[in-house]
Amino acid sequence: MSTQSAFHRGVHPLLQLLLPGKEAAVLAVQPDKALRERIEELAAKSTEGGLTADERDEYEGYVQANKFVATLRRQARQMQASAAS
């Protein structure tokens, strides 16, 4: 089982409690401009191999957060699709 699959399996029951009725709001959330720019900056530095240890930790935090947000969004889309059928 992949890390992402295991993560999804672990948080699925919690998402079932938190998401009902909030699917559209979850799907509408977007990072602000400053955050997007910071992530892009860190991604570019990472590609070039130029991250400091602190920047690497920060970037990894954003990567982990992105995985969580992706899981939330996937669950919200599935719940919307189920409600529509």
Image (cartoon, grey):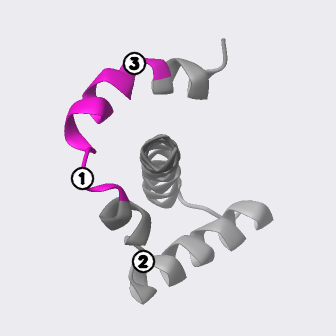
Between discs 1 and 3, the one toward the N terminus:
3
Q: Are marks 1 and 3 in contact (CB under 8 Å)?
A: no
Q: Which residue sits at x=44%, y=51%?
A: 69
Q: In the rendered structure, find residue 10 and report the number of the disc placed on it.
A: 3
- Give the secondary structure at mark 3: helix
Q: In the rendered structure, find residue 8 and report the number of the disc placed on it.
A: none
Q: Is residue 58 visible?
A: yes
Q: Which residue sits at x=48%, y=50%?
A: 84
Amino acid found under the numbered disc labelled 1: Gly
Q: Which residue sits at x=31%, y=66%?
A: 25
What's drawn in magenta, residue-wise? Answer: 9-23
**Neighbour class for label 1 at 10 Å: few (<14), some, many (≥20)?**
few
Between discs 2 and 3, the one toward the N terminus:
3
Amino acid found under the numbered disc labelled 3: Gly
Cα gap from disc 2 to disc 3, whole angstroms: 27 Å
**Neighbour class for label 2 at 10 Å: few (<14), some, many (≥20)?**
few
Q: Is residue 40 left or right of residue 31?
A: right
Q: Residue furthest front?
A: 85
Between discs 1 and 2, the one toward the N terminus:
1
Q: In the rendered structure, find residue 21 and report the number of the disc placed on it.
A: 1
Cα gap from disc 1 to disc 2, whole angstroms: 27 Å
Point out residue 14 in the picture as x, y percentages from the top left corner. Answer: 26, 28
Q: Nearer the viewer, mark 1 or mark 2?
A: 1
Q: Quadrant of residue 18?
A: top left
Point out residue 53 in the picture as x, y percentages from the top left corner. Answer: 50, 52
Q: Label 2, on which residue?
A: 35
Q: Nearer the viewer, mark 1 or mark 3?
A: 1
In this rendering, the answer to whether 28 lies above or below 23 is below
Quarter holding the N terminus? top right
Q: Which residue sits at x=43%, y=48%?
A: 76
In this rendering, the answer to whether 38 lies above or below 57 is below
